[in-house]
Image: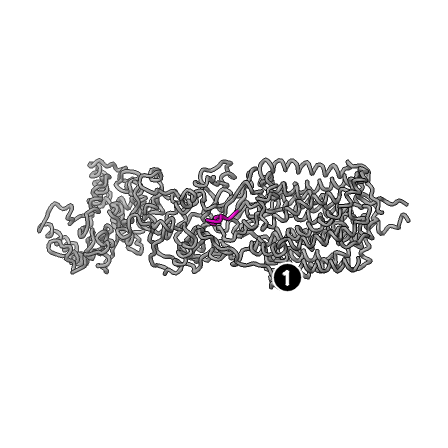
Amino acid sequence: MHEKQALGGKLLTKPFWVLLGLVMIAGLLLIKRFLFGIGAVTNLSDGYPWGLWIVYDVLIGTALGCGGYSIALLVYIFNKGEYHPLVRSALMTSAFGYTLAGVSIFIDIGRYWQMYNVFLPWHINVNSIMFEVAACIGAYVFVLWIEFSPTFLEHRKSMETKKKLNKILFFFIALGVLLPTMHQSSLGSLMIIAGEKLSPIWQTGWLPLLFLTTAITMGYAVVIFESLFSAAALKRPLDETPILGKLSVMMIPLLVFFLLLRFGDLIWRGQLGNIFDDGMLGAFFVVENVLFLIPIIMLASAKNRMKATTLFWSSGSMILAGALYRFDTFLVAFNPGVGYHYFPSASEILITVGIISIEIMAYLIFVKKLPVLPAIKHS
Amino acid sequence: MGTLLTSTESSEMSFSNELEAQGVSRRSFLKFCTAITAAMGLPATMVARVADAIASPTRTPVIWLHFQECTGCTESLLRTTHPTVEELVLDMISLDYSETLCAAAGHQVEKSLKDSAKLNEGKYILVVEGSIPVKENGIYCKIAGRTALDILNDYGSRAAAIVAIGSCASWGGVQSSSPNPTGATGVHEIIKDKPIINLPGCPASPYNLLSTILYYLTLGKLPQLDSKGRPKFAYGRLIHEHCERRPHFDAGRFALQFGDDGHREGYCLYKLGCKGPETYNNCSSILFGDVGSGAWPVGTGHPCFGCSEEGVGFTKYIHEQADVFTDSPPASYAKIDGEKAGGITVAGAAVAGAVGGVIVGASAMAAKKMKAEETAPESDA
Amino acid sequence: MNLERRDFLKVLSVGALTAGNVTSVFAGIRKTLSADAVGILYDGTICIGCKACEAACKQYNDMPPESANLEKAQGVEGIWDESYDLSEKTLNKIKLYEHGDASTRNSEENGFAFVKKACMHCVDPDCVSACPVTALTKNAVTGIVEYDKDACIGCRYCMVACPYNVPKFEYAEAIPEIVKCEMCNHRQAEGDIPACCEFCPTGASLFGKVTDLLEEARKRIKLVAGSTYEYPMRSLDEGDVSPKTVAPYINYIYGEKEGGGTQYLLLSAIPFTKLGLPELSASSSASKSEGIQHGVYKGMVAPIALLGGLLYGAYQTTKNSEG
C-alpha cells in the first residue's frame, strides 16, 4: 500500500557530530547534577520549583509528541485512511518525545531512585493529578513503542510476528488514544491547585480542556512541520504536501474552539478587562493568541494549504503558540510572591538542548536505518 | 613662682597644688575633665572651660534636704572610689546644709540652714533627696517639727534651681508603691514655678549629679532636659539600646533561670524580667562605683528592674516582662519582601538567545528550500 | 464512516463532556478539624522579634545555621544564623514589617511589627492533595502535616501547590528532601510542646488545641486597646500568664477560614496582606482541583466508556488490514 523505506545515506554527517557534541556537554552537566544536586545546574528556587525542564522537556515535549495521538485519532477512530502514510513517522516522533519526557522527569525529580513509588499501590494518592499524569505517561510510553514496533518487525523481516501483533494492535491503538486524552488534559489541570499563584487570566477550571485541545492541534502541527522540515533538511522531495495540506484543515476547527472557549471563559469570569493589569503578562497573552490566530488565517484558503511554505509557517506558529501557552501557564503567569525570580541557567538550557539533540540524533538514525519514511518515488 | 599669672590662672594653680597634695596629678585631673565633659555631651573643646569651672574659687551655695529616703543617693556619692568626684563636688560647692554630712546637729544645724537660706536667697541650689508625703497635710515626715511639705515649699521658693536627686525626689520612688499610704510625691508635682532637674535612679548615679552641677557652673544654664525634666545626656536612651547583652537579645539567647547554662553564659535577662527596654538611664554606659566593667545590675547577672523609671520601678513586678515598645530592629533584619536569587544571568540569556537563533535560522533555511521547490517546475511526472 | 459509528461517537463525546462538566465542580469546604487537632496561635502584637523561636527551632530540629552572605563573600560557613526567609535550613522565620520611620511598634503608619512564617498545617492541605505518592500526609489525630522521605520522589508539586510557599527543597543536596515545619511532632510524641512555643519569652507563640486557640483568639480581638490582659505563655493548659498592654488588634483571625482553615493561626495589629500573607478564599485550591478531577474520573466511568468506544473503532479499522 504505502511503502516505507529506510532513507539510507551517511549517518555521521557534520550536523550529527555537532549534535553529538551537544549531547556530550549535556552529559557532563548531568554528572554535575547527580553529584551536586539540582541547584548546581539550574536556577530553580523555592518560589519556582518547576522551570525549563518541566515546562519544556515534559509539558511541551509531550505535546510535541502528540502526533501519534492526533493521527491515530483520525486514522483509526474516524477511519480516515488517507492519512495512513503519516502514521509511522508520527508514532516514531511521539515515541521519542514521550520517552525523552520520561528521561527528563527522571533528571528533574529530586529523589529519582524512588520514582517507581508512583506506581506502588500503597503510595499512590488517587486525588493527586500528578499521579494520574505520571501513571498515564508511564503507560503511554509503553503503548507507543508497541504501536511503533511493526516498523522494527518489518526491518528484521519478522513477518509472522508482525501479523500476530496486528491482530491485537487495536487494543494498543485504543489505549493510545485514551491515555493521551487523559494525561494531556490533566497536564493542564496540574495548575489548578496553584490557585491564586497563577494569574486569573490563565487560571480557570477549563484548563484541562484548553490543554487537551492545544495538544491535539499541536499533534497535527508537529506532523506537518516535521515532515516538511525533515524533507528540506534531508533533501527529500516534498511529496507529502498534498496530504499535509488536507491534514492542516483539522487545526482550524480545533483552534476556533480553543479561542472561543478561552475568551468565553474570560468574559464569563469577568476577567477580560483585566488582561492588561500587568503590562508584561498582557503582552504575552496577546502574542499567544496572535500565534493561535495565524494558522486559522493562513490555512483558511484551500489554495494556500497546498503551499509547503504556508503549511510550514502556519504549523510553526501553532507549535510556538502551544509552547508559549504552556510556558505562560506554568512559568510566566505563575507568581509565587514578591522577591522571586526565575530564568533558566545556562547549564539548565544546555541540558535541555542535549536532550533535544538526542531526539534529533535518534530521528536521524531511525529514518536512515528503519523503514519509517515513505519510499521516494522515482520517475 | 615669679611669673605674672592671671587671677584665673593663679586660682587654678592653687587648686592644682591642692590636688597634688591629695595625690591627684594634674594629668589625672585633666583626664577626668575630659571624661566628664564627654559624659555631659559637650564637645571636646569645652574641656578647658570645664576645668576652669572646677578650679574656680567661687563656690555655689547648696542646701541639701532629705525627706522620705534611704540616704542611698548621698551614700553612693560618698562611696565613689575615685576620690576626685567626692572631693570635687564638695570643693566646688559650699554645702551649707546636709543632715548626713554636717558635723553639727539639732538646733545648731537648723540655725545654719535658716541663715544660709537667708544669706543666699535666690542664689542657692536646692538638692532634694527623698519623696515628700502629702497625705494628711504631710505629717508622715517631719524634721525639727516642720512637715517635709512645708520645708520644701519654704526653701524651694527661695532657691535658684532645684535638683531632685534619686527616684524618690523625682517621682516618689519606693515609698510611692501601691497603695502609697503616705502620698509620697516627687518634687516637681509640688513646686511648679522653679527650674527642676530630675535625676532619677535608685541610687542616682553620682556622676550624673556631678555632670549636672558642672554643666551649670561651666555654662551658667541647665542642660537640655527631656519631657520628664531629666538631662538628656544621661536619660536620653533606653538601657536596652546600650546594653552589652543586647546581641544575645537580638539572637534569641536568654537566661531562663538564675544559675542555668544561659545565665552562666551571660545571656540576655529579658525573660527574667529585665526592664531595660522600658527604662531610660545611662547605667549601662557609666556603670557604678567606678570599679571597672560589669559593675551594674545586668552586668552582675540580675535583670534591671527599672528603678529610675516612673511606672516601671517599684510598680511592675521584678520578673514581669517589659514592653519592648520603642525598639526599632536593626537594618539587617529579615523583611517581609526580601529579594531572592534566580533571575536572568548573562550566560543564561546568551545560551537562550543562541538556541532561539538556531531555531529561527534553521526554519528560515528550510522554508527557503521549500519555496524554491514549490516555485521550481515539476521535475518528474 | 457509517451512520452507526458516527452516532455512537457523537453520543460518547457528549456524554464524556457532560460527565466532566466543569461548571458543576465541587469547590467547597469539605474537610473539618479533627477532634484533637493541635495548633499554634501566633500573636504578632506581643511578639518582640527576639527570634528565640528561630533559635530553638533550629536546635530541636537539628537544622544548620544559614550564613549565605558570609559564604558568598568569604567562602566560610558562619556559626550564627543569618536567614532571611523560610528555606531548607530554616523551618520558621520572623520577619519585619516596617513603614515610614518605623518608630512605633504595632503601628501600621510609621511603625514596625513582626510576623512569624511557618507551615500553616492547613485543614485541607493543598500539598497533601498534590503529592502523587502520599509523602505529605495529614495526621488523622493531631492534624499535623507530616513528611515521609521514603515515599517522596522530589517532584516538588507540593511547592507549586502551597499558597504560602512553605515546603522547601534541598536544591544543594545530591540526596534532597522536602523540608518544612512539622510542629515538632517528635517533641509532642514525648509530651512536650513545639520548641517555638516553649522558648517564646512573651507568649507570642502559644500551643494548644485548635478549638481552644480559636476561642482565645476571638477573646483577644475583642479586647480594648490599652487595657491589660494576662497573656498565657507557652501552652494554653499550663496556666502561666504574663500581663501586658493590649495593642489595637486587626479584627480578624488569619487562618480561621483561609483555604478551608489552618491550624496555625495569626493575630496582628497590621493588615495581614502587608505581612506577606495571601488573601485566600474559604475553599482550598485542592478542593477545586480534586473537584474537577473527580468530576471527570468519578469511578473511572468516563474513561472506561471512552475506551469501549475506542476499542470498537480501532477494531473496525484494523480488522481487515494487513498491517
Q: Secondary structure at mark 1?
A: helix
Which amino acid is tagged 1?
A: Asp
Q: How is the image coloured?
A: one colour
- Disc 1 chain ID: A
Q: Residue B342: x and y, percent? A: 57, 45
**Residue C77 or residue B50, whichever sits in front:** C77
Q: Is residue B210 left or right of residue C232?
A: left
Q: Residue A228: x and y, percent? A: 79, 48
Please tell me whether the stretch drawn in magenta is mainly helix, strand or loop.
loop
State whether residue C290 appears in this view. yes
Circle 1 packing at 10 Å, graded few (<14), some (14-19), many (20+), is some
- Residue drawn at point x = 49 percent, y = 48 percent: C139
Is C143 a magenta residue? yes
**Part of the protein shown in magenta:** C137-144
**Residue B104 or residue B160, whichever sits in front:** B104
- Residue drawn at point x = 36 percent, y = 57 percent: C246
**Residue B241 or residue A146, whichever sits in front:** A146
Q: Is residue C22 above or below residue B20?
A: below
Q: Is residue B157 left or right of residue C74?
A: left
Q: Which quarter of the rendered picture does the N terminus of chain B lie within?
A: top left
**Residue A123 or residue B119, whichever sits in front:** A123
Q: Is residue A1 left or right of residue A364?
A: right
- Residue at the spot of label 1: A265
Is C92 a magenta residue? no
Where residue A214 sits, quadrant-wise, is: bottom right
Q: Residue C125: x and y, percent? A: 52, 51
